[in-house]
Image (spheres, grey):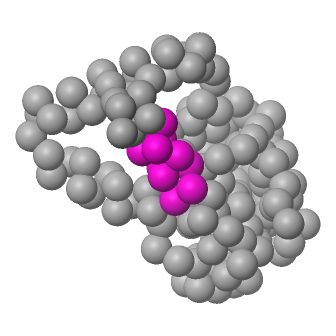
Amino acid sequence: MNRTNATLTALRRILKATEQHGREVAKSVGLTAVQLRVLKLAHENSESTAKFLACRLQVSQATVTTLLDKLSAQGMIERRVSVCDRRQKNILVTPTGITALKRAPDPMQREFTQRFEQLNDWEQAMLLAAAERIANLLNADELDAAPILATGEIDGELED
């Protein structure tokens, strides 16, 4: 197999693994991987606001608001007016949301992060350079993307 095909095969494996993980999350808790990530961040930071979550996820506040609307509709979160600043609303995870977090499969992103951070600095730099170059080759280096291992639109619906 030539290097081009080997590289395309490796990329396809990455995409398939990401899609498979997304399906596992959806099947187990009825959330997309991104919705689960928002829920987890809100749970870790009890005084979260939409702006805080948007900054942490590196996406627009409008995107986070859409995700929060979907989580709210499912009873996973509540929005409460902040005691400190009545103009802000804090995002609180409900017992239903906490149950979903407990039932969700272990995120693939966490495993990747742990393994990646165990690599030597030069290996991390090499992989980053290669990934950025591949994005460039695919004309994808200018696309807006959050550091979340998921396919599709970040605020998209679950796929059937």
Position of 138 relative to 93 (above/below): above
Residue 14 x, y percent position in the rendering = 48, 49
The answer to which quarter of the image holds residue 88 is top right
Left or right: residue 142 versus residue 134 is right
The answer, for residue 94, to whether it is visible in the render is no
Quadrant in the picture for the C terminus: bottom right
User: In percent of the image, x 81 and y 48: which residue is there?
Assistant: 156
Q: From this viewpoint, which residue is outermost toward the right?
A: 73
Residue 75 x, y percent position in the rendering = 83, 74
Residue 111 x, y percent position in the rendering = 34, 62
| Part of the protein shown in magenta | 8-17
User: In percent of the image, x 36 and y 39: which residue is there?
Assistant: 1
Front-most of residues 119 and 9: 9
The answer, for residue 113, to whether it is visible in the render is yes
The secondary structure making up most of the magenta span is: helix
User: In percent of the image, x 57 and y 56: which residue is there?
Assistant: 16
